[in-house]
Amino acid sequence: MSTSSAPQPAPPAPLVEVAGLRVRFGGRRAAPVVDGVSFSLARGECLGLVGESGSGKSVTARTLAGLTGQGAVVEYERLAFDGQDSGRFSESAWRSVRGARIGFVMQDALSSLDALRPVGREIAEPLRLHAPLTREQREEKVLALLESVGVPEPAFRAGQYPHELSGGLRQRALIASAIACDPDLVIADEPTTALDATVAAQVVELLQKVKTADRALLVISHDLAMVSRIADRVAVMRAGRIVEQGPTEEVLRRPSHPYTRELLAAVPSAASRGARLSPAPAPAARPRASTRSRQRPAPGTVLLRAADLTRSFTGADGVERRAVDGVSFTLAAGETLGIVGESGSGKTTTARIVLGLERTDAGTVALRDRPWSALSRAEQRDERRNLQVIHQDPLASFDPRHTVERVLAEALRVARVPRGPRRRERLLDLLDLVGLDAGMLRRRPAELSGGQRQRVAIARALAPEPEVVVCDEPVSALDVSVQARILDLLRDLQRDLGLAYLFISHDLGVVHHLSDRVLVMKDGAVVESGDVEDVFTRPAHPYTRTLLNAVPRLTTTGD
Amino acid sequence: MTIAPSVSDALPEPASAPPPGRARAASAAAWLRSRRPRVGTVLAVAFLVLLVVAALAPGLLTSQDPLAPGGGPGFLAPFRSPAHILGTDQDGRDLFSRLVHGTRASLEMGLGATAIAVTGGTVLGLLAGLGTRFTESLVMRLVDVVLAIPELLLALVVVALLGAGTVDALVAVGVATIPYYARMVRAQTHVVRRSAYVEAATALGLSRSAVIRRHVLPNAVRPLMVLAAIGTGTAIGVGASLSFIGLGAKPPAPEWGSMLSTAVPFISNDWALVALPGALITLTVLSVTVAGRALKRHSEGRTGR
């Protein structure tokens, strides 16, 4: 440092510079998970890293914070944090950087917070490590931080444990601990994924405030709409590469890469109603093979009638809570009834009552005007084939020992398809129906991708030739492009088989895309119901309006 | 009658699972890695194979009669006579032959007792896991009481009731170890019973008994095999202990535990009479346990996938 002009006016050097970043797991010859990623991030800027699962976005973010772990091989042309080569940081150097200069907000607030510590102590931790503060000063600072992230009654909340806080408050506490030492860079990995729409909207607002003039924010998400609300620039990742990056407006309005266009088109919304979401062209409807043994019901026949369903549970505190409170609806052949609501609104309990997996305290469910909920378990068994279910987590819903063939064969056995060539034929037919080939039969569900698993689950639900299918969050665990294909499949099946769907989801876009009518649930009760267009465009109930306003919207011209 | 081309899932879906070919290659590599056995495991398995041969066909390893007294002079030290490699015991019987012929009793003890324990444990565990709340507390309190008593003591009680003898000792050890398996099966049954796939089978319309038979039972019993392998080693040890205190196999039958106990007064005459049966018991228990743990590691690696 011999230059006399030491206090040079600093050029606006980016805080983070990444060029040609490659990360591999399991040795130098393994296929890279992150494959030549380059970007930079300046103070006062927010970059959104968008991609589907397995695209390498989280690994990229973790590399920036030196958290790739033991087995990783990291190569780069440039990897700099505030001008220093962060690829060469020792573990102890990282320790003085993490928490102090880089704050990390993890996806799952419940498992990222120490379950055995009050959140106040958790937030005080980085301060204790990196800031020369006395105990009293620290406590004051913790309360100020909680206040700043919008946690009500900070003094009381600081003494609570993570499990005593709601998901939104946990996420706020996590953000508070990430910004405790006033870091230069905050990395938020899927900060809103586990949250209800209204809470997620609040967290997004909070993140917008986290970005200050001298702080950079890196947001990682699969949700383009969410990212578009905060990010100045967006980088779209796919299979370890950034396929497109640029100003948010630019990327969303004029996507240059086909993958970005596909992602944008895959998002279900009001506008996508009646259109296909996935790029696969709709094959002409061909007549179904004749392995079906049953007649489809005439459209408009009321298949399911639920009247005044009510169910209370006694909580751990001994207080009785009504999970479902006087819910009534009908479902006709060939139609889709959506049920929307946030977690805890009673949608899943309603579905379980309809399926006869949960009893109802009052009220009745009738299938084709015959009593259903009042039947004994054994009597219900004979009727079950009319009423099938598709779960949110298909993997958990398969016996881990069974191959796809056994899973489907069991469903056909229940449907009384005799063993032998008939069953085999019907089995192949089912696979065909959901767009899988016979090669899948020998695989176990754990060896399939998320989309393939959900297709198998759909095939199993269709095996007994049901009239009504209850879909409980069938696409919420899937990436948006896979979700698009599954939603298209569900719509095609409805058209071809005349199925009636009871479609439960927290995602208003998905419900709007697929449903004919909709029920909005809150605290166990239906607050609003009616034609989906009416409810979503002219919501009568304030809660419906709140829900709709919380949904991040893509302001695109589409493609 | 395809709705979507079946390739659609394979194409632009960089989902959690890698493409099948790569997944298979990767899992094959992982399989090989996990299969690259440790030296200890190889030695343990080799020893067990030798034991099985000795148990099934002792004639392959020795031509001497383990029971014929006066096959040679008494207290012949090891490696003195080619006819009696390990020497002879107090009655002049060939020690090597007696050790070889004693293998069968030990293995029978280990396997038989474990079979009783696994069967009893599975029945009780399923009863508790699937029964009413009353059945469950009844069974589990009983199991807890039994669990509180050390297994050797409990085996003593059973022998006291049934009388001493090889089969009685076997039953005694088996009964004494039932609680471990019962607890395990019950806990596992609870997990499986609440699993989404059991609910899915119910929603599909399977009868309760079919759900139990096809889904609950196989999945609840699966982790039991590893526990049973390790338990076999323990059972062999406990069986030898019973014989040692004279409640198991009766002399002159060749059984390691009873050989050990009859040789104790002669320890100053011939160390090998005590040391060799003792070493065999130790090695057998060790080998079975090492092999069982290897099995455990293997199965955990697989389920962790």
Image (cartoon, grey):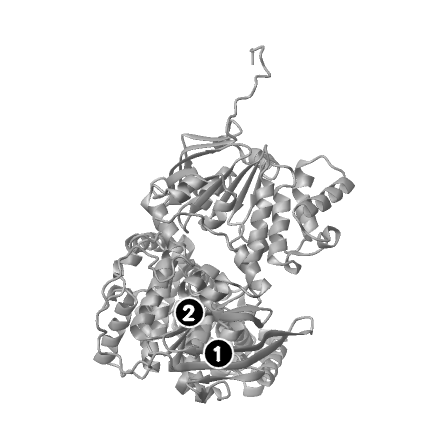
Q: Are marks 2 and 1 on the same chain?
A: yes
**Residue drawn at (34%, 60%) of the image:** A275
Secondary element at image label 1 = helix
Give A392 or A486, whichever is nearer the viewer: A486
Residue type at the position of mark 2: Asp
Give A346 or B117, whichever is nearer the viewer: A346
Label 1, on which residue? A354
Residue type at the position of mark 1: Val
User: B193 above or below A152?
Assistant: below
Q: Image check: A256 left or right of A532?
A: left
**Residue drawn at (41%, 50%) of the image:** A52
Q: How far across and how far down the image is residue B218, in percent?
A: 42, 75
Q: Can the viewer see residue A531 in this picture?
A: yes
Residue A516, numbered circle:
2
User: A529 above or below A215?
Assistant: below
Quadrant housing the N terminus of chain A: top right
User: B143 above or below A95?
Assistant: below
Chain of the residue that carries numbered disc 1 in the rendered image:
A
